[in-house]
Structure formats: structure tokens, C-alpha cells
Image (tube, helix red, strand yellow):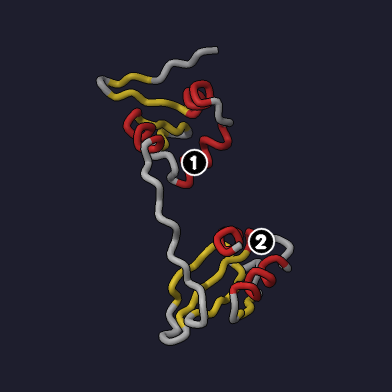
Amino acid sequence: MFIMPKQIGSLTLYSVDDLHEQLGLSKMTIRTYLREGKIRGRKLGVQWYVTEQALHEYFNEPVKEKPKSHTGKNYRYIVQGINDLVSEQEECDTLEETIECINQQAIISLFQVAIINRQTSEIVELVKARDFVERYT
């Protein structure tokens, strides 16, 4: 089945179905990319639509710099639940200790890590636990 994108004047709009057919990605993956902002799109009613310009931006996206590393003795880490269901919180002094603490959790996606500057006690960054583990292992 070949699906045609919608044409409104000079604007071409691609639906999730169009992108699925043309790119060979699952519809779930495309919707995830849209929700996360990896592909810029708009939701009209219940349907997502992507412009040709947004597709060009996605495929020509410059390589992002690696996130700034907040490591060393200048930082401490607090592993904490992200919602009211998980009220646990544990402070860690090292990356290794923090990763070990995260890996002991039954559902990692319910946690985040607050990276705190020891000198100012300011939160420098909040990182999803899974992203923290990927970044520092």
C-alpha cells in the first residue's frame, strides 16, 4: 500500500504512516522520535505530521557534542525517585557508587540522579538514571 503525503499549497505534510512506509521504521519508533523532539512535528487532532523541512533537519542534524562530564571530587550525586511512588533517595560520593546504587534498583526508569556541586550545593544537572549509567560506563 503506497501512502501519499498531504499537500496543502506548497506545504507537504507527512503522517506517521507515510514515514513508516518510506523510511521502514516502526510507527512506535516514529511516534517516540516525535514525542522526544528528535523529529520536529505537529499533532493535528490525533495525527502527527512532519514537514519536509523537519525531515531535512533530522537527517542533516549536526553531531551533538558529548554532554559535559560532571565527575571528580567536585561533585556528589543523589539518586532519587522521580515521582511520588518512589520516595527513596541515596547520596553517593563517586560515580562507581552511584552506578552501583542505580543498578540495585528494580525499575531504573523510576529514578534520576541529581549532580550537585560540592562547593555551592547547587544542582548542576538532573539526569535520568538510565542515561547516567550509559554516559558514565
Q: Nearer the viewer, residue 94 or 2?
A: 94
- Check the image and report above or below for 17 versus 106: above
- In the rendered image, residue 118, in percent from the top left (x then y), is placed at 47, 84
85 sits left or right of 18 in the view:
right
The answer to whether 54 appears left or right of 26 in the picture is left
On screen, residue 3 above or below 135: above
Q: Are marks 2 and 1 in contact (CB under 8 Å)?
A: no
Residue to which mark 2 is pinned = 108
Q: Secondary structure at mark 1?
A: helix
- For the N terminus, the quadrant is top right
Inter-mark Cα distance, 2 to 1: 21 Å
Q: Quadrant of the C terminus?
A: bottom right
Q: Is residue 100 above or below residue 48?
A: below
The residue lying furthest to the left in this view is 10
Q: Residue at x 41, y 85 (%)?
A: 120
Amino acid type for the residue under numbered disc 2:
Ile
Q: Which residue bears the numbered disc 1?
A: 33
- Give residue 9's position: percent from left, percent from top: 26, 20
Q: Quadrant of residue 81?
A: bottom right
Q: Residue at x 43, y 73 (%)?
A: 124
Q: Earlier in the sequence, mark 2 or mark 1?
A: 1
- 113 lies left or right of 65: right
| Outermost residue, top side | 1
Mark 1: which amino acid? Tyr
Task: Tell me the number on the disc at residue 83.
Answer: none
